[in-house]
């Protein structure tokens, strides 16, 4: 089963058949598709790398609920925490973004009701895409890595490169005479390892331990105390709290 088939199996029969037919008519879609966007009372949009494909099928809110129930194994309540974060990671590492009417309490989102949109983001691993930057990351003299920050505009592959770099650092890099390192990953939003029922869906190396669904501060602290990582990696540094967590972890390890 390819990655697109992993996703469309969650759709009701009508939508499944339409998507399957569309994919069969154009084989290039499977290799270039990035997202499947489903909105209540709107057509389906397939977002490709260079263009969008509009499918003239009007999705009902009932169908959206059917999709969500299937994603949640018919137990939406069990996925409440993930839904409140705005996404669910499904088998294969694909991420389903969710929007609707937020229910708040003490300025915190405690639930989403009247779900109106789903965005299936197709996960893809690009092996060895980090090769060009490994020479700048690796400290050959000490057989470790330099403290590294990967920066780029949105959608340019930061997480993909980070994931592959973790994999190679964890496994070891024979051509650089680099021995594999114990890596700890704080996967706060589930985009690096893409855990599904506790199992990483992406290849992040043989010496990598992952903690997900927690803040960077808590995750780093737990990893340092329990797994003694030589390398710590995280994604999407965007707040003062994230920076403080990195600084504290660096000081603890030093």
Image: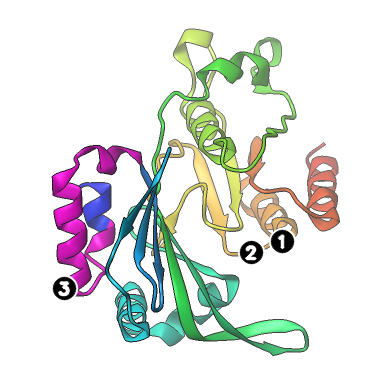
Residue 23 as seen in the image, left or right of residue 135: left
Part of the protein shown in magenta? 7-32
| Disc 3 packing (10 Å; few <14; some 14–19; many ≥20) | few
Residue in the foreground of this view, choosing between 238 and 41: 41
Q: In which quarter of the image is residue 73?
A: bottom left
The residue wearing badge 1 is 218
Residue at disc 2, secondary structure? loop
Q: What element carries label 3?
A: helix
Query: In the rendered image, is residue 142 in sight?
Result: yes
Q: Real-space Cα distance between discs 2 and 3? A: 36 Å
Q: Is residue 97 shown in magenta?
A: no
The answer to whether residue 9 is magenta is: yes
Label 2 crowding class (10 Å Cα cut-off): few <14, some 14-19, many 20+? some
Q: Are marks 3 and 1 in contact (CB under 8 Å)?
A: no
Residue drawn at x 40%, y 37% is 125
Residue corresponding to mark 2: 214
State the image coordinates of residue 10 (x, y, percent, origin top left). Answer: 26, 68
Residue at which label 3 appears: 13
Q: Where is residue 133 in the image (x, y as percent from the top left)?
A: 60, 19
Crowd tier of the residue under label 1, counting other residues whose Cα lies within 10 Å: few below 14, some 14–19, many 20 or above: few
Q: Compared to 10, does 78 lie above or below?
A: below
Q: Is residue 112 left or right of residue 196?
A: right
Discs 2, 3 touching: Cβ within 8 Å: no
Task: Give the structural element (helix, strand or loop) at label 1.
Answer: helix
The reply to whether dot 1 and dot 2 touch (C-beta < 8 Å) is yes
- Residue 251 percent location from the top left of the image: 85, 42
Nearer the N terminus, badge 2 or badge 3? 3
């Amino acid at each position: 089963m390819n990655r697109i088939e992993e996703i469309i199996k969650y759709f009701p029969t009508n939508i499944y058949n339409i998507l399957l037919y569309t994919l069969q008519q154009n084989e290039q879609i499977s290799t270039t598709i990035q997202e499947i966007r489903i909105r209540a009372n709107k057509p389906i949009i397939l977002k490709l790398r260079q263009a969008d494909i509009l499918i003239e099928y009007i999705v009902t809110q009932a169908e959206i609920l059917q999709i969500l129930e299937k994603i949640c194994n018919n137990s939406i309540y069990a996925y409440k925490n993930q839904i409140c974060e705005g996404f669910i990671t499904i088998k294969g590492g694909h991420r389903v973004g969710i929007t609707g009417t937020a229910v708040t309490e003490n300025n915190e989102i405690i639930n989403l009701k009247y779900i109106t949109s789903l965005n299936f983001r197709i996960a893809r691993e690009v092996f060895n895409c980090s090769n060009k930057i490994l020479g700048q990351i690796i400290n050959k003299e000490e057989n470790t890595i330099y403290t590294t920050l990967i920066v780029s505009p949105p959608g340019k592959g930061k997480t993909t490169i980070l994931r592959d770099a973790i994999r190679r650092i964890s496994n070891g890099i024979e051509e650089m005479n680099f021995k594999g390192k114990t890596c700890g990953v704080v996967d706060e939003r589930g985009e690096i390892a893409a855990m599904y029922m506790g199992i990483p869906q992406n290849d992040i190396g043989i010496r990598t331990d992952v903690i997900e669904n927690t803040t960077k501060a808590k995750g780093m602290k737990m990893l340092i105390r329990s797994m003694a990582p030589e390398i710590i990696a995280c994604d999407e540094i965007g707040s003062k709290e994230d920076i403080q967590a990195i600084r504290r972890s660096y000081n603890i390890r030093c």
